[in-house]
Image (cartoon, grey):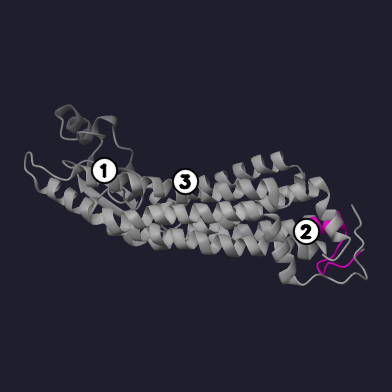
Amino acid sequence: MTAVTVAGTPAAPPFATARAMLRLHRPALFLWTGVVLAALALMVWGYGWLAEPAAAAYQRLKACDYACSYDQDAYLTYKDVLRYASYLVTFLPLLVAAWAGATLTSRELESGTAQLAWTQSVTPTRWLAAKLLAPATLLTAGTSLLVLLHHLLWAEGRRADVLGWNDILIFQANGPTTVALTLFGLAAGALTGLLLRRSLAALAVTVAVTAAVGFGLNWFRGYFWPTLTVTAPLKDGPWFGGSVVSYGAVTSTGAHVPVPDCAQYWSAAKDCRAQLDKQHIVRFYSEMHPYSHYWPLQLTATALTLALTGLVVLLAFRVLERHTGTVAKGTAV
């Protein structure tokens, strides 16, 4: 444990500490501003000029019986813009995690800058609070704006049927889960920097942990809210609308059993019908989430991510206390 002497030294005002932190990370601030502005420009273009023509082109194509002309370029351009915007917004938390792990705390601890600041006018607790508060404010504002505009861009072009609400990129980029995951990346970077005190190692660990949490949320999101059970007749096969969590077959006794291999694609085949009758299968079922479950799933995932972020922040302050010998109020031991 490293003892830090701060007793008798006037503490720097909170706003002065935050301003010093922003000056130190000015290149990252400029980069973040540039990313936000570029993403905003891309989505404003798609929302204002591409969504409606793409929807009109798709509806014209959908109404055709055989062949007709439609504005294919408008449809494909909107699809590309939405896909690129979705990638950009979805992977923002990883960009933040990389920066936080590489520079937020690890670089100053590695170079000794943090220890020097602690012996002057900044207590360790206030130092870490400034490291988290100022970026968290900017990240929340910027990411929220991007998520809102992305949702508008997607909703404006829903009639184009490009990407459904349950697409992994759309679900992530359309709601507050992305904002929460961005804050998690920030907190995880601070914690790993305090633990490892090596920029490259902290960067790698932070990105890996943030990616794991993001993939975990998408992997288990179907279980965040009760599903609806939808059944379908044998002639239609299993139903895959909405966001399907599981599916199978229903026997005459009401039992749920796996779908025979032959029924995965064409349940009306004679050899398959004989197998279905042999197992007394009368219908298919799907456990799924309709679009009305979108916000319950989003808000549950967001709440879980924020709870995990709060835990990581608490651990970061505990690690700092253990390393510096300071108590929560930042006094010397």
Q: Which residues are magenta?
A: 320-332
Q: Which structural element holds mark 1? A: helix
Viewer-side label of 3, 2:
2
Q: Is residue 113 left or right of residue 166?
A: right
For the residue pair 238 and 104, the one nearer the viewer reads as 104
Task: Report crowding for label 2: few under 14, some 14 to 19, many 20 or more residues within 10 A (C-alpha).
Answer: some
User: Identity of the amino acid at label 2?
Assistant: Arg
For the residue pair 289 and 86, the one nearer the viewer reads as 86
Image quadrant in which the C terminus is located: bottom right
| Residue 55 located within the stretch drawn in magenta | no
Asked if marks 2 and 1 touch (Cβ < 8 Å), the reply is: no
Q: Quadrant of residue 265?
A: top left
Res. 140 visible in picture: yes
User: Identity of the amino acid at label 3?
Assistant: Trp
Which comes sooner in the sequence, label 3 or label 2? 3
For the residue pair 257 and 299, the one nearer the viewer reads as 299
Q: Which structural element holds mark 2? A: helix
| Mark seen at residue 318 | 2
Q: Which structural element holds mark 3? A: helix
Residue 301, image x, y percentages = 49, 57
Residue 281, image x, y percentages = 24, 40
Which comes sooner in the sequence, label 1 or label 3? 1
Q: Residue at x 30, y 37 (%)?
A: 259
Q: Residue at x 80, y 67 (%)?
A: 328
Report how far apart the C-alphas of labels 2 and 1 lie in the structure: 51 Å
Q: Is residue 171 left or right of residue 261?
A: right
| Mark seen at residue 219 | 3
Q: In this figure, what is the number of numbered marks?
A: 3
Q: Is residue 155 above or below residue 203?
A: below
